[in-house]
Image (spheres, rainbow, N blue to C red):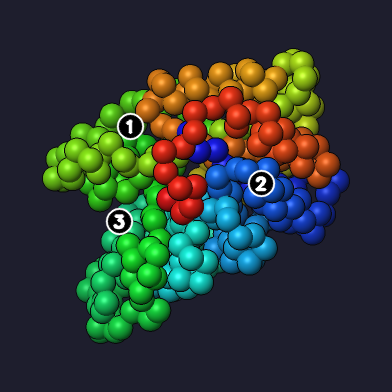
């Protein structure tokens, strides 16, 4: 099993942007020191739910601050990015980090970001497959042109070429955030691993894996490719000496952050939206994920792996909102939980 930290740069009530970003950077540094496999970086705009607006930029910083750990985006939002620009950045980080970078991409939501960046609602509603396929071509081919509905340009050379990495000529791994049967099928047809969200339980994730496998087989991917897909399960982790103390800590800290963070989202077309109840959502997350003693956390991860077939995890470590508590949480994850889990069968980097 391979366990990584999921970092949102969450701005808890009363905190400034710099404080949240400093905690995010320290979380990644402590994750490497504590033996974690990877760190995954979220991207958001205009909301305190997460104050990192460019996961790929933060990844560049952290790759320079670390030497072993894999660093991935979770996720870079494709509808508000140009696939070629993102592909160039991914290739750059892949080549300069020795293959430690992975590119997670997603569709995002119908947020005002689409208006601010000029992408428009269609980029969210129907443009994701075109963007994804152009990105994949840029990472896999020496020269690329485009004749799509959104992107059209003459053939140009790919510079820098990600396949020029002597250690990892396959280029940076790409992983797709999946929240619906349509996105699961899209990823499966392309043979791309999935990042599955925190709100999903084991049964739902197992169903999504089965749907992905069917789509991958339909597209002609080999049984070996299907078995070695490398899906990632996102979750929350909080460790305490007594199980109820871990849940109590999150129940006190997370609802305030969720209320302000989720409530700040604005839809691009002013469509009504229903926000999750912050208290109920916190309770749901505590019930689904490794929250408790080290032994309970290890058992929870093992159970999820057995039920879903997923053995890679990206766990939100900053649910307390406190820097010292976050650092302690990560260290305990590395020192007290990881030794109780099966060892990974592959090298910890890259994360994709």
**Numbered disc in front, either 3 or 2:** 2
> Residue 199, position in %: x, y?
52, 30
234 to the left or right of 19 = left
Task: Tell me the tag on residue 209.
Answer: 1
Q: Residue at x 33, y 32 (%)?
A: 209
Secondary structure under tag 3 reads helix
Q: Residue at x 21, y 34 (%)?
A: 214
Observer-nearest residue: 104 or 331?
Answer: 331
* Residue annotated with mark 2: 31
| CA–CA distance in space, label 1 to label 2 | 28 Å
| CA–CA distance in space, label 3 to label 2 | 33 Å
Secondary structure under tag 2 reads helix
> Residue 166, position in %: x, y?
38, 70
* Residue annotated with mark 3: 129
> Residue 99, position in %: x, y?
46, 62
Reply above or below: 39 against 342: below
């Amino acid at each position: 099993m391979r366990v990584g930290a999921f970092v949102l740069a969450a701005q808890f009530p009363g905190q400034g942007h710099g404080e949240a970003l400093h905690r995010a950077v320290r979380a990644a540094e402590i994750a490497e020191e504590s033996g974690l496999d990877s760190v995954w970086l979220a991207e958001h705009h205009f909301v305190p739910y997460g104050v990192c607006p460019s996961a790929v930029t933060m990844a560049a910083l952290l790759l320079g601050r670390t030497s072993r750990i894999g660093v991935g985006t979770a996720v870079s939002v494709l509808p508000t990015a140009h696939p070629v620009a993102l592909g160039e950045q991914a290739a750059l980080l892949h080549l300069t980090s020795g293959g430690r970078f992975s590119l997670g991409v997603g569709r995002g939501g119908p947020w005002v970001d689409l208006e601010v960046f000029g992408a428009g609602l269609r980029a969210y509603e129907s443009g994701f497959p075109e963007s994804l396929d152009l990105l994949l071509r840029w990472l896999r081919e020496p020269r690329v042109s485009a004749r799509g509905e959104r992107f059209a340009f003459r053939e140009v050379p790919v510079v820098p070429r990600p396949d020029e990495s002597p250690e990892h000529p396959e280029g940076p791994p790409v992983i797709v955030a999946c929240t619906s049967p349509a996105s699961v099928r899209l990823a499966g047809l392309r043979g791309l691993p999935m990042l599955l969200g925190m709100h999903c339980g084991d049964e739902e994730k197992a169903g999504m894996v089965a749907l992905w496998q069917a789509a991958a087989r339909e597209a002609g991917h080999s049984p070996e490719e299907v078995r070695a897909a490398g899906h990632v399960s996102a979750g929350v982790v909080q460790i305490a000496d007594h199980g109820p103390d871990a849940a109590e800590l999150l129940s006190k800290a997370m609802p305030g952050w969720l209320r302000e963070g989720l409530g700040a989202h604005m839809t691009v077309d002013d469509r009504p939206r229903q926000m999750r109840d912050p208290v109920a959502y916190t309770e749901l997350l505590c019930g689904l994920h490794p929250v408790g003693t080290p032994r309970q956390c290890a058992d929870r991860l093992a159970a999820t792996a057995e039920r879903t077939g997923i053995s890679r995890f990206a766990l939100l470590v900053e649910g307390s909102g406190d820097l010292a508590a976050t650092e302690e949480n990560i260290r305990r994850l590395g020192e007290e939980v990881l030794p109780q889990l099966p060892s990974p069968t592959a090298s910890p980097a890259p994360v994709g």
